[in-house]
Amino acid sequence: MKVIDKDSKWGPRKVYVGVDSEYKNFSKGVRVLPAPYFEDRKIMFNFVAQHDPGTPGWPEGGYEVSGPTGDFRAYFLDALILHPEVIKRRHKVDIETNKSGLKRGRKSGDTTPVKATGTGKRGRPAVAPELRKNKPYVANGLPRGRRKKSE
């Protein structure tokens, strides 16, 4: 894969040539790298939408991308790839579906009993009953709460 200049009716523009199919698997919100920013890879661009050729407003088709300042930009179909850092991570973990088994929590539909681990002591330890300021309520037939000042 390399970046070349291609002539268009608005002047030369940068495009990718010889791109593998794994660099074109876009999903909403994934980090992408437009061809004009191939040399400066630190700028963040996120994929928004793909427009096929013939879509109203997109006669040649293209990609919609959110820029580093939150603005929306449009690129031709041959001027956008996944960011190389995303590709490196995808070899370890599939970002879209997380198929590597690294999900958190318990699997749904799992009926095996949960085994408690640890010592069973969580939080602040209980105070001994003789050291407590507030004693537990003992029924004595009188109404609960503070007594009236006068009867």
Image (spheres, rainbow, N blue to C red):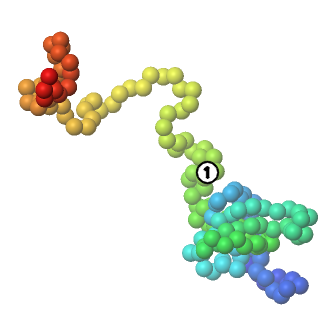
Q: Quadrant of residue 101?
A: top right
Q: Quadrant of residue 4?
A: bottom right
Residue at image x 57%, y 51%? 93
In the image shown, does 7 or 135 lie closer to the viewer?
A: 135
Q: Report the label total.
A: 1
Which residue is at the far bottom? 11
Residue displayed at 63% across by 80% down: 39
Query: Between 144 and 102, which is closer to the camera in this rendering?
Result: 144
Q: Is residue 31 visible?
A: yes
In the drawing, does residue 115 fall left or right of residue 145?
Answer: right
Compared with 42, 96 (above or below) is above
Seen in the image, is 73 located left or right of residue 53?
left
**89 versus 70 height, above or below:** above
Could you tell me residue 38's position as x and y percent? 66, 77
Residue at the (29%, 32%) spot, across then down = 118
Is the residue marked by circle 1 packed among few (<14), some (14-19), or many (20+) residues within 10 Å? some
Q: What is the secondary structure assignment of the residue under circle 1?
A: loop
The residue nearer to you, when weighing 37 against 54, is 54
Residue identified by numbered label 1: 94
Please state the horizontal and vertical placement of residue 72, each as a whole percent of the image: 70, 71
